[in-house]
Amino acid sequence: MTRSAELFERAQKTIPGGVNSPVRAFKSVGGTPLFIKKAEGAYMVDEDDRRYLDYVGSWGPMITGHADPDILNAVRSRLDLGLSYGAPTGLETEMAELLCELVPSMDRVRMVNSGTEATMSAIRLARGFTGRDKIVKFEGCYHGHSDSLLVKAGSGALTFGVPTSPGVPEDFAKHTLTLTFNDSQEVRDCFKEIGDQIACIIVEPVAGNMNCIPPEPGFLETLREVCDQSGALLIFDEVMSGFRVALGGAQEAYAVTPDLTTLGKIVGGGLPVGAFGGKEEVMNQLSPLGPVYQAGTLSGNPLAMAAGITLLNKLRQPNFHQQLSDYAQKLCEGLEARAQAAKIPLTTQQAGGMFGIFFTDAPKVTTFAEATQCNLEQFKQFFHAMLDQGVYLAPSAYEASFVSAAHGEKELAFTLAAAEQAFAQLKAG
Ligand code: PMP
């Protein structure tokens, strides 16, 4: 029995499913999750001392690689000053100034402790600001696990949402409408009918929770337009895409300006941080200035701010994002070429430093429904064949994978050689 298997067995006795976040359990790919001992650069080492080239990067934050010495030093330099004060610090303003500078649409920002908290708070603020209850989201987009957002479509686009999880009251879910990602016409039809009741649209501008699905030309622009016409707010959930697809996030890459933006992952440099921000007139509705309540005991934690500020500043080096994007592009092209040589139908999609692989003969995947039609069995086999060779991909066919600045030519060659083997195994059946 491996040490990971032993630890997993033990964990299941006290932690539901043995994990503190479900996708870590390898449920959708099968097998035993790796328990990690340490990580550095592009690599993680598990409790059995096996080394893996990592394409998860803690689900996004490790964009400069694991155990980045600059971030570790920034945290170390704060340690002896105390861990938390429950009173303001200059670091929080430094972080806020940085975010307002980097994220094109942000005039004001508030720090929270996770992406879930950021989206939940942004939705409340949008409802408070507009005085409306209904919200629009898109099928396959994930915005954390708060009640209003764990909702799937009813039987037709304009029917009330239904909870995706027991514990979410139908009375909450009915205020959430779930439309089809990349379907501009459906959005227009919805707004024509009930636009004046809608508080906000929340969208992952590059979807990363149904594999990797970039917006089709015109989709984000349509969202902006219907929001402008109806008085609804446009929220870009950039928890994943923020600082990753471009320094200023998807809003910079696609030149569409949201009213509010939610951030997470990279913003904390690997410590638990989220943020939401946007237009001054909207953000000023928050307590203590305005009536919309939102708070957090550990929000703006000094260690987390030090880590986040250090990481964000590192991303400003020229060409940082171009290099990530080049790597991801070469990787995707290399994977497609090797799959084709092995006669395995495969499509890849990429936005900056995030990418996804789809086992399908469709040339592109633009919606959740299309993503679910891909060959999940082949994905599972591919995932395990790669893992056996020391390449750790996102353990689900519905998650994007990530590259970091620590991924270089050596890592690219290693991954493509492993993929060639993996495709050969798939072909042999
Ligand atoms: N929004 C998006 C787009 C995400 O990808 C995630 C997490 N993967 C969240 C929100 C929730 O963030 P957290 O897990 O930090 O609560």
Image (spheres, rainbow, N blue to C red):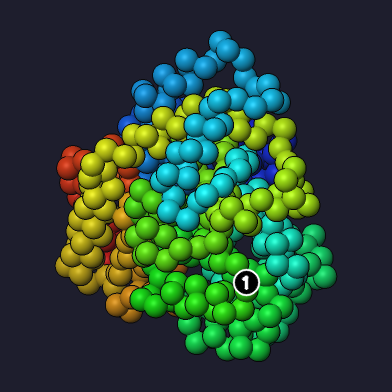
Give the residue pinned by disc 1: 232
The picture places residue 46, in percent across and down from the top left corner, at 44, 32
The picture places residue 270, in percent across and down from the top left corner, at 49, 35
**Is residue 248 shown left or right of residue 306?**
left
**Is residue 181 shown left or right of residue 52?**
right
Label 1 element class: loop
Residue shown at 59% from the left, 53% from the top: 280
The residue lying toward the viewer, choosing from 11 and 357, is 357
Residue shown at 74% from the left, 61% from the top: 128
The residue lying toward the viewer, choosing from 210 and 71, is 71
Which amino acid type is shown beneath numbered disc 1? Ala
**Is residue 345 shown left or right of residue 104?**
left
**Is residue 94 shown left or right of residue 20?**
left
How dense is the environment of label 1, judged by Cα within 10 Å: few (below 14), some, or many (20 and up)? many
In the rendered view, would you say 324 is above or below 329? above
The picture places residue 351, in percent across and down from the top left corner, at 33, 60
Q: Quadrant of residue 362?
A: bottom left
Residue shown at 63% from the left, 52% from the top: 283
Residue shown at 42% from the left, 60% from the top: 251
The residue lying toward the viewer, choosing from 58 and 425, is 58
The picture places residue 301, in percent across and down from the top left corner, at 61, 29
- Can residue 153 be seen by looking at this rendering? no
Count of numbered marks: 1
